[in-house]
């Protein structure tokens, strides 16, 4: 990680993480957590375990929040940063307890955890005590909509990083690459053209990742693309 100027003006400098760096760190964090909890590392990580992991790093976790009333339509997760304290995370109530939306719940949980793990220190540093009085800041809230949970544009760096962390925690790089090699044995990827989700290899890979890691096909496709296993994505992802 290195610090670079933040063009959004939210911070003087912001962290730049290489994607591979995040992949390695997330896989290490998740493996350590599962080994401590269960004595072994197995995927898919259960939704209950994801909840336990996020609860370790926050002051309060509310999975039944009415985020529509607070922030409007389309908001599925919120992280409230409080300098000097652990953050508060809220998940929209419609995602919890609905089996049909469990995959969306899982990606939202890990997306918010990405903010908690990799962005909390920014607010602590920005609002550190100073010899000179400063104007008090209101609580900083990161509001996350569905369309940015998995695949935000890189200019929206906080959302992009949290989205990458989401995929890296649920679908560790080393395991996805191993799975891709197995899929390629029966469905060799084309050698002289772009590898898309509609190819025989792409379809089989997305299906295998979805099954093995309990994620949606959209999440599997985004992860495959970020790892370079697919060279293009479907433009009509619904997330």
Image (cartoon, rainbow, N blue to C red):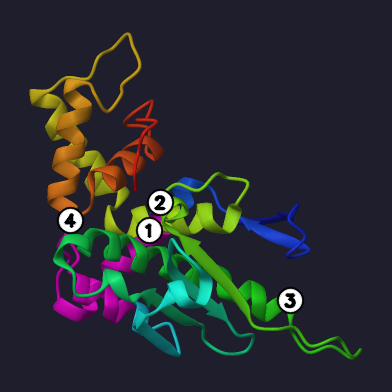
Residue 43 in magenta stretch: yes
In this rendering, the label closer to the viewer, 4 or 3: 4
Query: What secondary structure is found at the residue carrying circle 3?
Result: helix
Q: How far is disc 1 from disc 3 in space, using C-alphas?
A: 25 Å
Compared with 198, 124 (above or below) is below
Mark 1–mark 4 contact, CB under 8 Å? no
Residue identifier under label 3: 126
Q: Is residue 160 above or below residue 136?
A: above
Which numbered disc, 2 or 1, marks the residue closer to the eye?
2
C-alpha gap between disc 1 and disc 4? 13 Å
Q: Residue at the location (38% across, 26% down)?
A: 232
Q: Earlier in the sequence, mark 2 or mark 1?
A: 2
Asked if the residue at tag 4 contacts the one at tag 2, i.e. Cβ–Cβ closer than 8 Å, the answer is no
Quickly name the residue at label 2: 150
Does the residue at mark 2 contact the one at mark 1 (Cβ under 8 Å)?
yes
Query: How far apart are labels 4 and 3 at the CA level?
Result: 37 Å
As drawn, is 148 to the left or to the right of 237? right
Q: Which residues are magenta?
A: 24-53
Give the alpha-carbon distance from disc 3 to disc 2, as whole Å: 27 Å
Expressed as whole percent of the image width and height from the top left, the position of residue 239 reads 34, 48
| Marks 2/1: CA–CA distance | 7 Å
Assign a secondary structure to mark 2: loop
Element carrying mark 1 = helix
Q: Which mark is residue 214?
A: 4
Q: For residue 238, what is the image quadrant?
A: top left
Question: Residue 146 location, x and y as percent?
Answer: 41, 56
Which label number is shown at residue 166?
Answer: 1
Q: Residue at x 29, y 71 (%)?
A: 94
């Amino acid at each position: 990680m290195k610090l670079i100027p933040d063009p959004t003006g939210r911070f003087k400098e912001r962290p730049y993480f290489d994607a591979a760096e995040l992949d390695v760190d997330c896989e290490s964090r998740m493996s350590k957590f599962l080994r401590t909890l269960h004595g072994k590392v197995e995927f898919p990580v259960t939704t209950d375990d994801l909840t336990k992991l996020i609860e370790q790093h926050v002051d309060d976790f509310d999975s039944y929040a009415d985020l529509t009333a607070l922030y409007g339509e389309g908001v599925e997760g919120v992280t409230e940063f409080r300098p000097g304290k652990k953050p508060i995370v809220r998940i929209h109530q419609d995602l919890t307890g609905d089996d049909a939306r469990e995959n969306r719940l899982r990606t939202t949980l890990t997306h918010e955890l990405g903010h908690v793990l990799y962005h909390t220190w920014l607010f602590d540093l920005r609002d550190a005590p100073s010899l000179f009085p400063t104007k008090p800041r209101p609580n900083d809230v990161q509001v996350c909509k569905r369309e940015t949970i998995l695949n935000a544009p890189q200019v929206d760096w906080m959302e992009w990083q949290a989205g990458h962390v989401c995929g890296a925690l649920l679908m560790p790089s080393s395991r996805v690459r191993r799975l891709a090699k197995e899929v390629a044995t029966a469905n060799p990827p084309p050698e002289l053209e772009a590898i898309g989700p509609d190819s025989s290899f792409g379809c089989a890979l997305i299906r295998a990742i979805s099954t093995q890691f309990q994620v949606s096909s959209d999440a599997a496709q985004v992860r495959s693309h970020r790892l370079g296993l697919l060279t293009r994505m479907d433009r009509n992802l619904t997330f």
